[in-house]
Amino acid sequence: MKIRPVPSAPQVRVGASFRFPWLLAALVSATALLVGRALLAERQTIDDLFIFLRYARNLAEHGEYVFNRGERVEGTSSVAWTIVLALLWRMGARGAGVAKAASLVAAACIPSVTWFAIRRVAPSKPAVAAVAVLVLALDADLAAWASSGMDTPIWSLACIGCVALATTGRDRTTACALGALAWIRPEAPLFTAAGVLASSRSVRDALRRCLWAAGPLVALTLLRAAYFHDVVPNTFWAKMNAVDGKDYTGLGYLANALERRPLLLVAAPLFAWWGVRRGPVVRLASALFVASLLFPTVAGGDWMPNRRLFVVSLPLGAVLAACSIDALRSSAAGAIASLGLLLESALTFNHAVDQTWRDNERVDERVARWSLNARPFVDPYPLDWMPTHFMEQLSPYVASGDVIAHVDVGELPYVMGDVAFLDGFGLVDRTAGRLAFFPNDPRLRQAALSEFFGARPVAVLVVVDESTGQPFSASQRAVLEDPRFDAGWHELARVPTWGNHPCVTYVRRDVRPAADDVARARRQAWLARTPDVVAAP
């Protein structure tokens, strides 16, 4: 099989592509297909969306980038996305539906930006751009996360946008854009370093690009140090060394993604690197692609469905796949490769329609099958069974201004917006996050105890590993082993949760339950302040 090099610099104007009406039709069709498939999964909600929304609400209404008022802890995975949601909230566009619609807008731009990059870097065969955008449109993971309301679409768009920007020859702007990625995701410095070094033509050029990339990264770091009194997001401490609650090892998570898309994520990138003349743009796309595989592997995977951390790999892989096909001299070989990529994507269709990732959960099962909602992003989203259960269970005990110690900080804290939370896993709790990273540090353990007993939470929700009988959370494990806990709190109830691990509810001994009508009024007030969600039936 003969191959030929692909030019590293643009050879045609993108506008010339519109001489091929079928190519424009393919782009429009791919975008429409992606949006339509995303709407099938629009009713699926992820807990972390509500972390973004609680931060955005506090930022919009109180001018504080905080989860709990007065506690400056950076517990979101994207500064930029939080600010976008806060601005929308400030303008009156509020809640889960708005976040999901905004993420879909970002996702809908991914095929066009990918198409632009491919038409610049692989101009000799217009059909490869059409193949690439259709490959993206058919991918179930991209479709599922497109309407998630999370930062995944804007992160994927930003990374492929850097590649598209590099094709225009604006080296300084591209370097700045690579540095600005840190505003979107915490792992971005890895992408920035890989992208800057890979696209540089010499040592002097690398130094120049590093200086331009450092600007937005340094600005964000200084803001973090000044506002949060930390130089990395709190999610680093909570996630990077905590194995509890993860569904995969890093290598297992990687293998899961590569097994599903071996052509797009393995064969095509390897062939592009071996068979294509490696100009700056191809090197940049390759470097960002490698970074997109490396980070989830080092981070240890993710509990969320649809391989969230690998979604960014898809448009980058599509560019490399297009370069591979464009480098083939044989039209037959190019047709076979294109057909293989399209078939591989099409085989994931059932995953976008039938979300059965939690079909074994007895009491916390999400809706398994999807149909288009008559009013997407408008109808309220049903809470999961667990937060609804806890809201009803705790409403006789918890009033406005109280504190709850919870192993999770998703839907329940969003609804109970006037209640403060101690986060057992440490995503929005600096002390618990540090202990999750260093679980055997006696000083951090003592700090977690001081925080808990100083806050004296009215209620405590603890998920216990049924195999060990110990809480999954390091901070809650320390608390339950302290004799002061038995003296001050008593068990109220327990129910099975994810993996059938029991979730135990404790309440403070000196708190007496309110009357039924008072508890009902509290629940109604919480739900009235969050009309974008409704209690589970």
Image (tube, grey):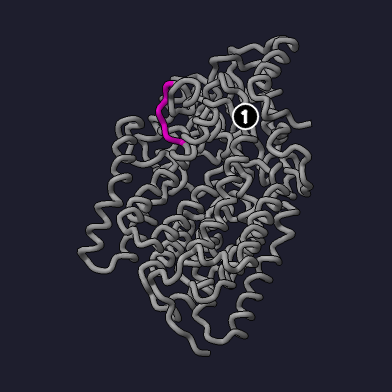
Q: Residue furthest bottom?
A: 1
State the image quarter where residue 432 is shown: top left
The answer to whether one can see residue 487 in this image is no
In the image, 524 versus 181, the foreground residue is 181
In the image, 209 versus 241, the foreground residue is 209
Q: Residue at x 36, y 68 (%)?
A: 280
| Main secondary-structure element of the magenta-colored stretch | loop
Residue hosting label 1: 412
Relative to 253, is 30 on the left or the right?
Answer: right
For the C terminus, the image quarter is top right
Q: Residue furthest left?
A: 204
For badge 1, the amino acid type reads Leu
Q: Residue 188: give x, y in percent of width and height.
A: 40, 51
Magenta-tinted stretch: 70-75
The question of residue 173 being in magenta is answered with no
Q: Residue 45: give x, y in percent of width and height.
A: 65, 41
Q: Residue at x 58, y 44 (%)?
A: 103
Q: Residue 162: give x, y in percent of width and height.
A: 42, 56
